[in-house]
């Protein structure tokens, strides 16, 4: 190539790089990427110096990996292209003695991110370990000052911890987070210290093995948060939501519902405030982009340019005030993120919309046991609407299955699909409690349909769906089918808690069948659960097991022992769970026992309280059960008028229930849901490849509490226990 040609290519390459700079300033990232791609193609690439080429490839890779547009996912093929550019950049930089250490470290960090998106976990861990070695060498040789070295340590340890958590190595992940937290403390960054403390708490919640260690992690994160000045707490919004949600998950797990409710109220208020702030910032950012686009047009008069420049400065100033501790560039580049850490990390847990959805879910989870169904319904509808909007942005519309998903959308899709099923699960539980069986059918059928379309992503949800099929069958009186689905759900989970609850639910179904053989089967199921009920975290399992054990004692004609057991379970349910349906059913059984023991006065008072709670919940089967006991009570007391009046009211409720059941039986979904077979799925993907692509976030999603949303666990932990009362309405007496 002639000197003139080389000179022309060099000038052309420099021009393209300058155009890319200008496009980035205008936030026209597509144009910037196109300019960089052109600069890196022949003949321009040959004119670039090695360091300039490496920088250009790094810039292009960052643009390709950044989630842009409404889908929040890189465009199809972008992660693979970014990986190729980053690998080439590292090949160029490694032998260059003049290459700044920061550039090499940045290349390693971006490459680890590309491997994460592609699900290449071994490569991701390898490049991160190599980066930590490079960092140690640069620090020891004095090429990198102490402050930047500590910040890069934080960055790589955070990335490594995430990869190790996905790989199921919780101990190593916690070790990496501890190293990151130490570096953050040395750096004097309370924001980063909090980030690492919260991340460690997240891993502890996912891999709950030592309750004392989990409690210590909660305490440590809380102490760091409480030590912050109020102004900093207001500005570090991402960390606020992260820590508050994690502490809420912890409180729900240990059944501290009163404290959890208080945190949820605080979260809900903050979410509403943040939503308003987000809208205001988006309006300002859109206006700023419009002004900058106009400023980029040629031929503007000086007066117009001056006015627009003044407007630009005003808008930037207003945005900076709204940004808090995040830089203006961060807000403009990552406006839909709730950032957890400063550059170079730019960490986030979940997209902003997903955080708002999760807060709605928390409101439902603390409200449903209290019977606040109207508000729960609003939040369920709101959450489902937001999730469906996000799924549409990802291209997930009718007919799309997991086989159609791009690598880059699998994580985000899995996140929203998991949240979707949690909302539908709560809807099923609410509708079954209210005896709205058709509504419950439809929600459960939706769960089945989503699972059939995304069986690998949602594989951790199958046991929950089977358990809900059991709850539905049980609620409509199909006890044999209910027991089948509960036992199938038990086989599908590795969680001891879930297995125990499925045994208990199946036992109730067997008891309700009424024959001697079924009662014997129920006893075989309840016995092992009763012996292990004190081994679980919290008291949800224990209260349910005591309830069913008391029912068995009643059937075995041991009323005094049943009364003692049920009284102890009622105390726990009332003081710690706040589940008024379970309390109502405990009271109903205790009222029945009081009547059997000829304590009519106590029976009357207990049953009044129970009926009030059952009416609050619109729980028709439990109301009928209570009314039937009242009828017996009035008959024993020879209160003929009350007996007849109560009997007529009971008959009306029975007629209402039968109407609802007949309607449910007539719908097509009914037979599909109760049939004694698991959901039949045709594999749409190679399972191991799909799990690799997912990088773990949803393959074993935890439907107990959503701490597994956005971060994976190697195995499912506790699945959600469907509302403690929703499976026990079968204990009503049938005359």
Image (spheres, rainbow, N blue to C red):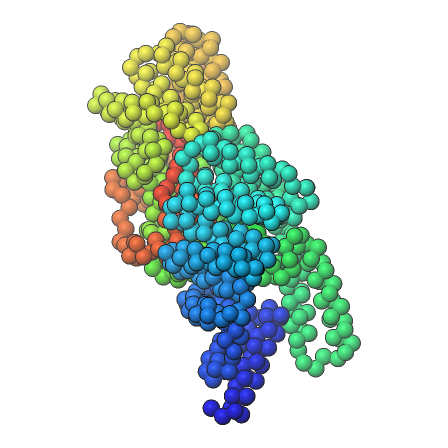
* Point 72% across, 60% down: residue: 317
Q: Is residue 367 left or right of residue 124?
A: right
* Point 61% across, 58% down: residue: 331
Q: Position of residue 212 (x, y in %)?
A: 47, 31
Q: Nearer the viewer, residue 225 or 732?
A: 225
Taking the image as drawn, is residue 695 in sight?
A: yes
Q: Is residue 195 left or right of residue 454?
A: right
Q: Residue furthest front?
A: 141
* Point 53% across, 92% down: residue: 4
Q: Position of residue 336 (x, y in %)?
A: 56, 56
Q: Nearer the viewer, residue 111 or 601?
A: 111
* Point 53% across, 51% down: residue: 154
Say if 205 sits above or below 691 in the image: above
Say if 601 sits above or below 176 in the image: above
Image quarter (top left, top right, bottom left or bottom right) of the C terminus: top left
Q: Position of residue 461 (x, y in %)?
A: 36, 44
Q: Position of residue 413 (x, y in %)?
A: 43, 55
């Amino acid at each position: 190539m002639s000197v003139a040609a080389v000179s022309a290519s060099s000038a052309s390459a420099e021009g393209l790089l300058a155009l890319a700079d200008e496009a980035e300033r205008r936030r026209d990232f597509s144009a910037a990427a196109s300019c960089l791609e052109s600069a890196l193609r022949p003949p321009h690439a040959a004119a670039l110096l090695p360091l300039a080429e490496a920088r250009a490839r790094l810039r292009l890779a960052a643009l390709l990996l950044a989630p842009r547009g409404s889908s929040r996912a890189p465009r199809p093929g972008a992660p693979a292209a970014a990986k190729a550019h980053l690998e080439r950049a590292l090949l160029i930089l490694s032998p260059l003695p003049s290459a700044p250490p920061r550039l090499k470290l940045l290349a390693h960090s971006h490459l680890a991110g590309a491997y994460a998106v592609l699900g290449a976990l071994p490569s991701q861990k390898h490049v991160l370990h190599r980066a930590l070695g490079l960092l140690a060498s640069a620090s020891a040789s004095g090429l990198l000052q102490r402050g930047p070295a500590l910040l890069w340590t934080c960055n790589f340890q955070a990335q490594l911890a995430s990869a190790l958590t996905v790989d199921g190595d919780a101990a190593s992940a916690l070790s990496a987070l501890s190293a990151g937290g130490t570096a953050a403390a040395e750096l004097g960054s309370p924001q980063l210290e909090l980030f690492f403390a919260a991340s460690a708490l997240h891993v502890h919640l996912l891999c709950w093995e030592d309750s004392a260690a989990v409690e210590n992690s909660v305490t440590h994160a809380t102490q760091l948060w409480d030590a912050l000045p109020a102004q900093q707490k207001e500005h570090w919004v991402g960390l606020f939501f992260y820590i508050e949600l994690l502490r809420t998950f912890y409180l729900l797990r240990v059944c501290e519902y009163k404290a959890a409710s208080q945190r949820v109220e605080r979260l809900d208020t903050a979410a509403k405030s943040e939503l308003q702030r987000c809208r205001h910032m988006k309006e300002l950012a859109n206006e700023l982009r419009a002004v900058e686009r106009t400023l980029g047009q040629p031929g503007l008069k000086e007066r117009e340019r001056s006015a627009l420049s003044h407007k630009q400065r005003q808008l930037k100033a207003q945005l900076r005030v709204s940004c808090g501790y995040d830089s203006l560039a961060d807000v403009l580049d990552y406006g839909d993120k709730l950032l957890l850490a400063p550059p170079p990390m730019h960490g986030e847990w979940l997209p902003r919309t997903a955080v708002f959805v999760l807060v709605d879910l928390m409101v439902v989870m603390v409200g449903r046991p209290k019977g606040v169904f109207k508000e729960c319904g609003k939040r369920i509808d709101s959450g489902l609407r937001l999730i469906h909007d996000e799924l549409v942005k990802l291209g997930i519309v009718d007919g799309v299955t997991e086989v159609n998903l791009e690598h880059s959308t699998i994580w985000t899709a899995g996140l929203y699909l998991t949240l979707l099923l949690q909302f539908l699960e709560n809807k099923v539980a609410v509708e079954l409690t209210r005896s709205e069986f058709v509504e419950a059918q439809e929600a459960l059928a939706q769960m089945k349909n989503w699972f059939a379309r995304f069986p690998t992503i949602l594989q951790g949800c199958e046991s929950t769906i089977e358990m809900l099929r059991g709850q539905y069958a049980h609620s409509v009186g199909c006890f044999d089918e209910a027991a089948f689905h509960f036992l199938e759900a038990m086989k599908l989970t590795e969680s001891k808690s879930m297995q125990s609850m499925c045994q208990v639910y199946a036992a109730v179904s067997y008891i309700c069948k009424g024959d001697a053989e079924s009662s014997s089967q129920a006893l075989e199921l309840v016995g092992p659960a009763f012996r292990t009920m004190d081994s679980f975290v919290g008291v949800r399992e224990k209260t349910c097991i005591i309830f069913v054990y008391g029912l068995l004692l009643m059937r075995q004609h041991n009323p005094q022992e049943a009364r003692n057991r049920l009284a102890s379970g009622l105390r726990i349910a009332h003081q710690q769970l706040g589940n008024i349906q379970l309390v109502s059913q405990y009271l109903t059984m205790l009222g029945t026992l009081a009547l059997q023991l000829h304590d009519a006065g106590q029976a009357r008072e207990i049953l009044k309280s129970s009926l009030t709670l059952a009416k609050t919940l619109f729980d028709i089967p439990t109301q009928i059960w209570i009314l039937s006991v009242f009828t017996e009570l009035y008959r024993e007391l020879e209160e003929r008028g009350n007996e007849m009046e109560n009997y007529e009211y009971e008959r009306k409720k029975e007629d209402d229930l039968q109407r609802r059941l007949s309607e449910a039986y007539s719908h097509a979904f009914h037979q599909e849901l109760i049939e004694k077979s698991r959901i039949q799925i045709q594999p749409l993907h190679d399972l191991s490849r799909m799990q690799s692509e997912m990088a773990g976030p949803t393959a074993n999603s935890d439907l107990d509490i959503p701490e597994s949303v956005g971060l994976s666990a190697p195995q499912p932990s506790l699945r959600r226990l469907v509302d403690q009362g929703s499976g026990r309405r079968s204990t009503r007496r049938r005359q």
